[in-house]
Image (spheres, grey):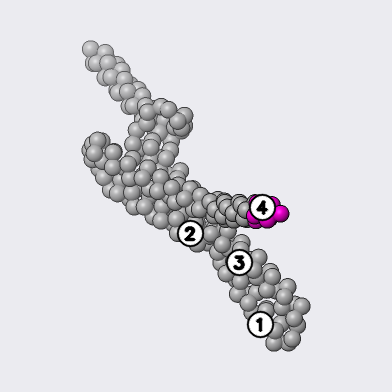
Amino acid sequence: MDAADDVNDNDVNDDDVNDDEVDDVDDVDDVDEVDDVDDDHHSPTTAEQYMKLRLEEMLCFYQRRVPDYNRYRLLQTFLLLSGTFAASICSRYELPATVTVVVALTGVITSWVEFSDSDRKVERYSGAARQLRKLRLWWQHLDELERMTHSNISKLIETAEATISEERSAWISTNQQEVDSPVGKGEGLRKQTGKGEELRKQQAGKGSKII
């Protein structure tokens, strides 16, 4: 009997070990599912998956852009200062041809600075990254029960999407202004040309009546 009881106890212990192993495997599978989740753009996701697929991706996108545009801005400032300094030196030593070339290059750099608009881009990307980092920190300070509430999940998604939409709206409005400005000038020139044609027709009509 004692031997039978020992065998049964060993079987129970083996079953417990096997159950623990199954639970560990299930936990690992759950972690892998969260880590290996892919964005197919239509399947429902949890809040944690949204954090990884949307918020973290956009935060990395903004953080990658800020150093690049900051370097562009510093380079542009350095070139403008160098051009001004070189023009002053050439003017001091009476080199008019060199001054003309330097001033022309400085004008090209100034146009490049205005076109690239690095200052606004750095401000826009850094502001969006700051808001997303604050949102991520707020979410990380919530406990498991608070993360399951509908109000907190809605706040997470609505705040993140509002931040991303504001950045994109600012980008679109900036590009639209750049596109509309030459068009407006072209329309003004066309209107002036139309007025000139009307004046020439009126003068031609008056000349024919005099004849």
Question: Residue 48, located in which quarter of the rendered image?
Answer: top left
At which x and y percent is residue 136? 35, 48
Q: Is residue 7 rendered to the left or right of residue 32?
A: left
Q: Tell me the residue at 70%/84% (across/down).
A: 91
Residue type at mark 4 is Lys
The Cα–Cα distance between marks 2 and 1, rounded to whole angstroms, is 30 Å
Instruction: Give the numbered dot on residue 110.
Output: 3
- Magenta stretch in the rendered image: 203-211
Q: Which residue is mark 2?
A: 120
Q: Nearer the viewer, mark 1 or mark 4?
A: 4
Q: Tell me the residue at 74%/86% (across/down).
A: 94
Q: Which residue is mark 4?
A: 209
Q: Tell me the residue at 75%/81% (across/down).
A: 96
The Cα–Cα distance between marks 1 and 3, rounded to whole angstroms, is 17 Å
Examine the rendered structure and indicate whether residue 29 appears above or below residue 199: above
Q: Are circles 2 and 1 on residues that touch, CB within 8 Å?
A: no
Mark 2 vs 1, N-terminal side: 1
The C terminus appears in which quarter of the rendering?
bottom right
